[in-house]
């Protein structure tokens, strides 16, 4: 009884956002261009390098091109959140153009990522980003379905899983929950923009090849400069999003009474620290709690915002390493939503409890005070 009296609800969205200075939300075209311009130029140079180089050099140049494409994708992601600059029209233009090499529909991404993933982070009935199945859900699948789950969560297959389940299944195909005719028309129009953009990209590739006197077969040029970097990019985007919400200490939820904004954005989101200056090179996308707490914070302010979050709260902060990543792969396969532990595919408990009873009781207080919209 004493605990019930003294317990406080978990902080709300506004309370957590108040822990970050107002300056972290300031957006300027100058800062956006400072982040965008070098990335775009490096991407264009990498494409030209693939076109102009002999095929024996492609094993190095193609992955490099895909890597830079994925970094450019991060800038487009910020624009899609309307956080890159202070101008919505400019963010929309930048996002649509920069999403083309990575094959993403701007409107589809806004719905799937901004509305669904950010709105329901780590709430399994709604969130789709690397959400684990329960043992019961897994056993109800066909043998082929079980194989796809295991294959898709295995690190070499991240790119294929991301392309099929997320990009095609959630972002290219209009979703049934988008009812408004205007929104569906915009989705189809952005698919047309994407298709025209991909064709224009291919035409530009062949035009550059002709201008440089390249004799490589046109089909090979399109494959090497456009499609192979695309698949490298999909793998990298899948890999980073896996790291954002998969860790032996990260909880997932099926019961809405246990889930709140705080559970998803603070407890359910990791801050992964890559060695050296890698986090800066990829535009601070791994300072992920700050981004989830307030997606309007631009990428060039995420370091300060994340530090302020960690001054007030205790998100999962982890240094990336090969050994720890492979450990996560072994531990985080299925999830026990009742006892809040990770499971192996055969049902063995593989982690300690990911969320305390105290936090769950505090989450229940949030719902008691605001039963309709806990976030």
Image (tube, rainbow, N blue to C red):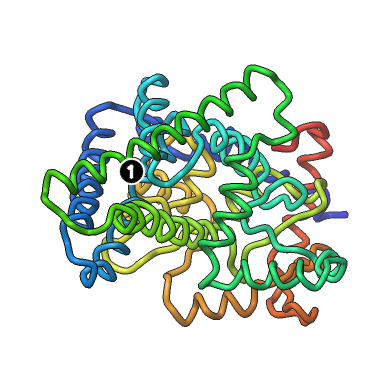
Badge 1 crowding class, 10 Å Cα cut-off, few under 14, some 14 to 19, many 20 or more, is: some
- What residue is at 35 percent from the left and 23 percent from the top? 90
* Residue holding disc 1: 202
* Residue 98: image location, x then y, percent: 36, 38
- In which quarter of the view is residue 249 placed? bottom right
- Residue 341 visible, this angle: yes
- Element type at mark 1: helix
Is residue 327 positioned above or below 63 on the image? below
- What residue is at 40 percent from the left and 64 percent from the top? 273
Is residue 212 positioned above or below 57 on the image? above
Q: Which quarter shows the N terminus?
A: bottom right
* Residue 6: image location, x then y, percent: 76, 49
* Residue 223: image location, x then y, percent: 36, 57
Q: Nearer the viewer, residue 169 or 138?
A: 169
Q: Which quarter shows the C terminus?
A: top right
- Residue 281 visible, this angle: no
- What residue is at 16 percent from the left and 56 percent from the top? 52
Is residue 292 positioned above or below 355 on the image? above
Q: Nearer the viewer, residue 353 or 312?
A: 353
């Amino acid at each position: 009884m004493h605990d019930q009296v003294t317990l406080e609800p978990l902080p709300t969205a506004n309370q957590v956002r108040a822990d970050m200075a107002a300056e972290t939300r300031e957006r300027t075209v100058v800062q956006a261009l400072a982040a965008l311009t070098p990335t775009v130029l490096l991407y264009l140079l990498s494409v030209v390098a693939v076109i102009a180089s002999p095929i024996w050099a492609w094993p190095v140049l193609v992955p490099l091109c895909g890597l830079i494409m994925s970094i450019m994708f991060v800038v487009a992601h910020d624009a899609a959140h309307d956080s890159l600059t202070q101008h919505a029209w400019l963010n929309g233009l930048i996002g649509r153009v920069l999403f083309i090499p990575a094959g993403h529909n701007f409107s589809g991404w806004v719905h799937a990522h901004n509305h669904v993933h950010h709105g329901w982070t780590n709430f399994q009935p709604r969130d789709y980003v690397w959400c684990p199945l329960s043992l019961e859900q897994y056993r109800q699948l066909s043998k082929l379905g079980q194989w796809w789950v295991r294959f898709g969560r295995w690190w070499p297959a991240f790119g294929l899983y991301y392309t099929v389940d997320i990009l095609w299944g959630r972002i290219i195909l209009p979703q049934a929950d988008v009812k408004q005719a205007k929104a569906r028309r915009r989705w189809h129009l952005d698919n047309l923009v994407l298709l025209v953009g991909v064709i224009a990209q291919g035409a530009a590739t062949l035009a550059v090849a002709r201008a440089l006197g390249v004799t490589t077969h046109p089909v090979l040029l399109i494959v090497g400069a456009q499609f192979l970097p695309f698949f490298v990019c999909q793998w990298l985007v899948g890999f980073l999003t896996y790291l954002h919400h998969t860790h032996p200490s990260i909880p997932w939820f099926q019961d809405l009474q246990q889930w709140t904004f705080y559970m998803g954005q603070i407890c359910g989101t990791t801050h992964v620290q890559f060695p050296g200056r890698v986090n800066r090179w990829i535009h601070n996308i791994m300072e992920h709690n700050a981004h989830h707490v307030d997606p309007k914070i631009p990428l060039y302010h995420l370091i300060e915002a994340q530090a302020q979050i960690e001054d007030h709260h205790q998100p999962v902060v982890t240094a990336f390493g090969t050994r720890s990543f492979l450990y996560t792969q072994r531990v985080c396969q299925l999830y026990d939503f009742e006892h809040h532990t990770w499971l192996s595919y055969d049902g063995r408990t593989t982690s300690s409890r990911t969320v305390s009873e105290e936090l769950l009781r505090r989450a229940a207080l949030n719902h008691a005070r605001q039963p309709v919209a806990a976030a």
